[in-house]
Image: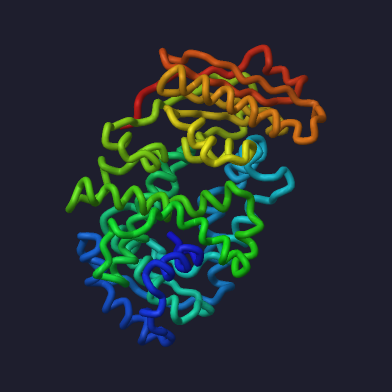
């Protein structure tokens, strides 16, 4: 788990950075951890079972850690598939090297991290001493969470992108809220502003974060969502379920539930889809987007975040495959709560995809098809985007409803 410099800046603004005092030496680091542990326990309602270590790291060591964790989470074959998928969706440029960009971005943004394997909280040596207490308060929450959950198992869910993002949102959201309560114990959660809207304030900080400022919309928003969107969800959860933890069976299973807590309360879990076997072509990658990334896709090409949110509302589940020898075929199925939501999304996607596939009004040798369907009795939409000569056009991959997440 990592503590982002972006979030540190936002938290500093909310929690009055002038209250923070400089922490420089190793002894001061350990003292700050010891002093904050009781406050973190009060903020989270959990008790520490063991004392975490706290250590310094150079920026080079931080980069080495980022590379190790990134390559562990996305081995070369998985990385190639994910990169192909996001290129086909148009969420990243065709020329963007996802691994290099992510490593550079994470190295820039990491202001501290907790490593479950070593039970240690690491702080880069070049962090502003005034920010150290902000980072410690956040990462101590992750150290505490790790004593009640298997953090690695949650953030390394394979081919379950949406569920992983939902789990990460709970972990980062809780850490973000608790961080503020630790630094400002008199603060009332209900008096804080809408966290997700705070990301607008980052525009004033972009000069300090050049790699972040130049990153595609999908990367920027995906990095912020678990912290800010997650904080909004956890604030709601703590109000509705005082004294309980959003773990175990209470852990949200989709970004739809994070975005719409009322749907979480109703047990509105996503419909699970599975592609038929054997596939019609070589499968290079398979995963889902979820409501949040579906919103980003529509925002990317329609340019209107409010409209994109409306078009993505009513999402009920999705699954996509990247196929073909050259990983140049995209087949994406989405299911919807009702026919109105499916029709609305299909029309919006048609407009978005016209802008995606021919930004200059010129054909690119590809063919795309957006079709309304019914899958397992549920309204659905299928997008296929592939070379015009792809042999799979005559036998498109099919999906079936398997179950509803519990």
Residue at 54% x, 17% y: name it. Answer: 398
368 with respect to 374 (left or right): right
Residue 397: percent from the left, percent from the top? 58, 19
Q: Quadrant of the N terminus?
A: bottom left
375 with respect to 35 (left or right): right
Say if 311 sits above or below 240 in the image: above
The way the protein has been coloured in the rendering is rainbow
Residue 252: percent from the left, percent from the top? 33, 41
Say if 376 sits above or below 75 in the image: above
Residue 363: percent from the left, percent from the top? 81, 27
Say if 252 sits above or below 191 in the image: above
Q: How many marks?
A: 0
299 with respect to 361 (left or right): left
Say if 392 sits above or below 153 in the image: above
Residue at 55% x, 16% y: name it. Answer: 372
Residue at 34% x, 70% y: name it. Answer: 137
Could you say which is closer to the camera, residue 146 or residue 363?
Answer: 363
Which of the 4 image quarters holds residue 78? top right
239 with respect to 5 (left or right): left
* Farthest left residue in view: 243
Q: In which quarter of the image is the C terminus?
A: top left
> Can the viewer see residue 84?
no
């Amino acid at each position: 788990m990592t503590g982002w410099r972006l979030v540190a800046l936002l938290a500093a603004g909310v929690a009055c950075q002038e209250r923070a005092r400089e922490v420089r030496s190793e002894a001061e680091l350990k003292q700050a951890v010891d002093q904050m542990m009781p406050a973190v326990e009060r903020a989270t309602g959990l008790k520490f079972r063991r004392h975490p270590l706290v250590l310094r790291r150079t920026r080079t060591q931080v980069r080495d850690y980022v590379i190790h964790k990134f390559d562990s989470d996305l081995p070369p074959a998985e990385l190639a598939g994910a990169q192909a998928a996001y290129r086909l969706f148009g969420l990243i440029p065709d020329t963007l090297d996802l691994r290099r960009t992510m490593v550079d971005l994470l190295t820039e943004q990491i202001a501290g991290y907790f490593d479950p394997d070593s039970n240690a909280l690491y702080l880069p040596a070049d962090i502003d001493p005034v920010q150290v207490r902000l980072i410690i308060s956040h990462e101590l929450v992750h150290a505490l969470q790790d004593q009640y959950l298997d953090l690695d198992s949650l953030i390394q869910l394979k081919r379950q992108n949406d569920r992983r993002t939902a789990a990460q949102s709970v972990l980062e959201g809780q850490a973000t809220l608790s961080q503020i309560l630790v630094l400002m114990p008199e603060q009332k959660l209900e008096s804080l502003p809408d966290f997700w809207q705070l990301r607008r304030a980052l525009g004033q900080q972009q000069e300090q974060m050049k790699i972040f400022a130049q990153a595609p919309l999908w990367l920027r928003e995906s990095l912020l969502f678990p912290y800010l969107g997650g904080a909004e969800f956890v604030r709601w959860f703590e109000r509705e379920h005082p004294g309980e933890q959003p773990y175990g069976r209470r852990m949200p299973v989709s970004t739809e539930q994070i975005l719409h807590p009322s749907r979480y309360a109703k047990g509105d879990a996503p419909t699970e889809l599975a592609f038929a076997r054997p596939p019609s072509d070589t499968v290079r990658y398979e995963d889902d987007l979820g409501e949040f990334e579906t919103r980003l896709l529509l925002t990317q090409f329609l340019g209107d975040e409010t409209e994109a949110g409306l078009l993505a509302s009513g999402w009920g589940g999705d699954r996509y495959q990247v196929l073909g020898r050259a990983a140049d075929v995209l087949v994406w199925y989405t299911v919807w709560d009702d026919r109105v939501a499916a029709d609305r999304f299909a029309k919006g996607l048609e407009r978005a995809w016209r802008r995606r596939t021919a930004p200059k009004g010129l054909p690119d040798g590809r063919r795309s098809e957006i079709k309304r369907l019914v899958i397992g009795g549920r309204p659905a939409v299928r997008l296929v985007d592939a070379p015009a000569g792809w042999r799979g056009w005559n036998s498109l991959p099919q999906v079936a409803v398997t179950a509803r997440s519990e």
